[in-house]
Amino acid sequence: RILIIDFGSQVTQLIARRVREQGVYSDIVPFNNAEGAIDDPSIKGIILSGGPASVTEATTPRAPDGVYEKGVPVLGICYGEQTMCAQLGGDVEASDHREFGRAFVEIRDGCALFDGVWAPGERHQVWMSHGDRVNAIPEGFRVVAVSDNAPFAAIADDERGFYGVQFHPEVMHTPDGARLIANFALKVAGCAGDWTMASFKEDAIRRIREQVGDGRVICGLSGGVDSAVTAVLIHEAIGEQLTCIFVDHGLMRLGEADEVVRLFRDAYNIPLVNVDASDLFLGELDGVSDPEAKRKTIGRLFIDVFEAEAKKIGGADFLAQGTLYPDVIESVSFAGGPSVTIKSHHNVGGLPERMNMTLVEPLRELFKDEVRALGAELGMPEHFVGRHPFPGPGLAIRIPGALSRDRLETLRKADAIYLEEIRKAGLYDAIWQAFAVLLPVQTVGVMGDARTYEHVCALRAVTSTDGMTADYYPFDHDFLGRVSTRIINEVKGINRVVYDVTSKPPGTIEWE
Ligand code: XMP
């Protein structure tokens, strides 16, 4: 396994993904929590991430000294290279020539990190993002690559297996970066590269059995991929000791609630309690138009209903949750003070404490795409595991303003047409998330010879890797025209369609 020590770079998670793509398990600890983590004997290599601080200031973070004394290879990336140099006797200075974005490195010498990828004399594109630069390298190191503004763009000490790169090999804009990371994990650190979803599944099943023994587990299904994969995995581990509860809040997409019930009850034969609570939810949401109030109402009702159903089942000691790795990683904050809540996403926060149950979270170590791969490994249908993310509060946050059954019905139809056209055009998998929004705005139109005064439907589609930042999807105009015509012709209540071209930031993905 490769341990990544995080100094707060925006792209630290990408390092873990690149390592895992090589079949090597990798996880992340914040620098201020790394001391104990590095003792683990399964660690065969350590990567120091980039970060926003400046090594030239004495108070900024350093790697624990044990990192360099453990006897395993170390790769420092950007800030990681700088802190490595500062700690091992080199020198780092603030530079007037800051480098951000695309740059080129010239390879000066071979080293194990470059093996089979880069050769002396070649020039290659990399991605830089640094203000400080290394001024003198520690003893034992050689310069193996330079750039215009970084005379120590890559340094190597093959003897100890210590490498430093000023550029970011983990991002796509360093085209050969993944191969350099592969060299570090497989050749330099000597990891076997046999971590696969099949082996993860076997391990996870064993751990679930160990944790649960002959206890009973309940799992809330949301209709989304994470909770579904959690349930199928746990069912494979402990069979009938698992009961699933599906709280249908009436805010799902067209046909989705039925699909969940069919998949679990019929295809997997997993005991499932299906609660139609739509009257309760829609009743309580009546007249609620503030987005946070909608989320809070839905979260509160969900917990109430779930708890009541769990009590009816009785005797469960464990609560299963589809928590993913990005939710678990402690983020390194330099801003000082808590960050602002943009949206309260944790819909069911507080549930485990209130119910006094022990959590079973078998996906805690996985990224979203790995959860999909695990679902496929468990034999779940492709179209189900490949589903776009869907927010817990469902369509309630896609109808700005007040909700009603009519509005939900209208939105469901428009959304289904939009998604059907996206699938037909073969674009579904290229898009991170796509959905329709029903606006509380009416505009004038003309249909046949009559005047209409109906609602506006906004279409949203974004590309993203983690939902934290996003770009609008550049559909061609014919496609948008086709969807617009179909929605207006087929959905009563909508007479105008617009396309949202806002990226995140400054927008968010959802409209509320
Ligand atoms: P935003 O709108 O914050 O969305 O850019 C980022 C991702 O989070 C999803 N999202 C939610 N998921 N409960 C959820 O479970 C919520 O309240 C919620 N709000 C947004 C959104 O669909 C996108 O994938």
Image (spheres, rainbow, N blue to C red):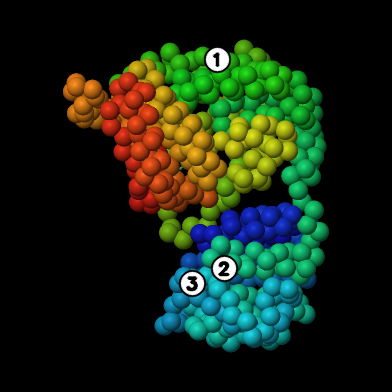
Report the residue marked by disc 1.
Answer: 275
Category of crowding for the residue at label 3, using alpha-carbon neighbours closer than 10 angstroms: few (below 14), some (14–19), many (at least 20): few
**Disc 3 to disc 1: CB gap under 8 Å:** no
Q: How many marks?
A: 3
Please tell me which residue is depicted at 57% across the width and 47% down the height of the picture.
326
Q: Is mark 3 within 8 Å of ligand 1?
A: no
Q: Which mark is residue 174?
A: 2
Report how far apart the C-alphas of labels 1 and 2 lie in the structure: 50 Å
The amino acid pointed to by label 1 is Val
Q: Assign a secondary structure to mark 3.
A: strand
For the residue pair 312 and 243, the one nearer the viewer reads as 243
Q: Residue 102: give its label.
A: 3
Above or below 493: residue 137:
below
The kind of residue tagged 3 is: Arg
Residue drawn at point x = 73 percent, y = 34 percent: 378
Q: Mark 1: which secondary structure?
A: strand
Q: Residues within 10 Å of mark 1 (few under 14, many from 20)?
A: some
Between disc 3 and disc 1, the foreground one is 3
Give the spatial CA distance, label 3 vs label 2: 8 Å
**Residue 491 in sight here:** yes
Q: Is residue 209 left or right of residue 154?
A: right
Where's the N terminus, which quadrant? bottom right
